[in-house]
Amino acid sequence: MNKVVRLVRELPLRSRLSLLTAAAVAFAVAAVSVTCWFIVRDQLYSQLGEQLRSEQVSPPLLQAMLRNCQSNDPQPIPQAPNSPIVTILYSDGSTCLNPGSKTVPVQASDLAVAKGTEPSAMHSATTTSGMAVRVFTQQVVDRDTRQVQNGIAVSIAKPLDDVTKPLSSLAWILLIVSGIGVVGAGAAGLWVARAGLRPVDKLTETVEHVARTEDLTVRIPVEGNDEIARLSESFNSMTASLASSRELQQQLIADAGHELRTPLTSLRTNIELLTRSEETGRPIPPADRKALLASVTAQMTELAALIGDLQTLSRSDEAHAGDRVEVVALQDTVEAALRRARLRGPELTITADLEPWFVRAEHSALERAIVNILDNAVKFSPPGGTVDVRLHAGELSVRDHGPGIPTDELPHVFDRFWRSPDARALPGSGLGLSIVARTVQQAGGEVSLRPAEDGGTIATVRLPGAPAAPPELP
């Protein structure tokens, strides 16, 4: 059995569907055929039994048979062709029948009728010559007195050919019809499987084409709203997502290469000047040499920051969040970020109004995002300016009094490597706000920038949470 199941599983899907369809139809046809055969058989036996019950032995024939039974030289009694076999049965088991008739064996039910314990009996039997018959035994009633004669019964037997021949013909007919039905079901199942799996074939060809050519622009036509259509839609969505991911990856590589080119070029130029000075023996003035070394240090710092930002963005969402998500006291995280911001802008006045708020996020990533927002506020604030920080009901707002961001540039501020024309001369990689947007979205929040009414920019971060820590947090 296991071998058969294994062989079926190794067949192609189309063959399995055809085989299962044919097997299901064969089972249904077999069940119907067997049920039909048994119903017809019972009906034929019932009809034959009714005929035997209605069959009456003529009184002259019965009297002649009784005389033959008492005579020492019984004479054959003429009967019509195909007449039933009539047997007189006594309670002691002896029988009397018309000379030349076939002998029907006596059964216990027949003796019970002869003894008067049963009114009648019906059963099947086989004559001594091997012919199958249906036997009906009943008590003998006196014609004159209408009284039952005890100790004697009469059996009437008819051949079962009227039952067996139609049943045999019916069995062959049902067998032939069932065979035709199974073959037709197999052919229909094969056709249905081919028609039903045609979209799957198209999907397979498309997948093979994508695997062979890496062409993610291919789309499968979606027809209807069944499971195959849903599968096609899912495949189209998957290829669209992969194409978008590849495009973003290529864009990230191109942007990273472009951003890396500027500090690397500056580093190369400065190092070549220092090297040439050493090779030619022409010393660079101390002030210029100090400026060159400061420029090299700044470019290396910028490269390190850019590489760190790229590593942060390259981490997948699962790796970025994962098991490191925990309950974070947002007000404490903002306080830590404020301490770092005050060190970077000691000439600025940074005010803070923080209310308790607890969120679920990765602590280090969330602190880095808030530091990036405060760095932007410090970077674009004028000397002696003010930065206002406020945390209320899960909404963190950072407001600076710098030049602000033009309205047409607001849609691009969270794009990777995007920097406004006025900020390209300032240090930075253009990835800070991208990291902010990603971190906030992973924490289930949202971030936005808008210009302030009296100048400057307001950065707003909204994070879901609660004003009190959960019980499990100490």
Image (spheres, rainbow, N blue to C red):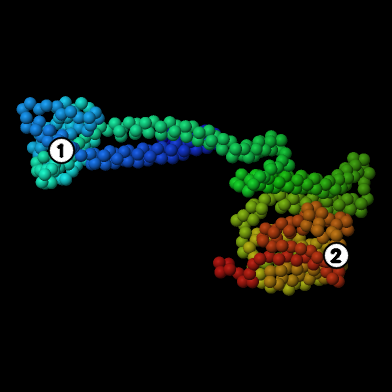
Relative image position of residue 367 (x, y in whole percent): 70, 62
Q: Is residue 75 above or below residue 359?
A: above
Quarter occupied by residue 197: top right
Q: Earlier in the sequence, mark 2 or mark 1?
A: 1
The residue nearer to you, when weighing 295 against 126, is: 126
Residue 175, percent from left and from top: 41, 32
Q: Is residue 46 left or right of residue 403?
A: left
What residue is at 60 percent from the left and 46 percent from the top?
227
On screen, residue 73 above or below 451: above
Q: Which mark is residue 190?
A: none
Q: Nearer the viewer, residue 121 or 31?
A: 121
Q: Which residue is mark 1?
A: 59
165 and 429: which one is in front? 165
431 over 56 or under it: above or below: below
Tell me which amino acid carries mark 1.
Answer: Pro
Q: Position of residue 57 (x, y in %)?
A: 18, 37
Closer to the camera in the image, 127 or 316? 127
Relative to 197, 308 lies left or right: right
The circle on residue 404 is 2
Q: Quadrant of residue 129?
A: top left
* Local crowd size for mark 2, using a 10 Å CA cut-off: few (<14), some (14–19), many (≥20): some
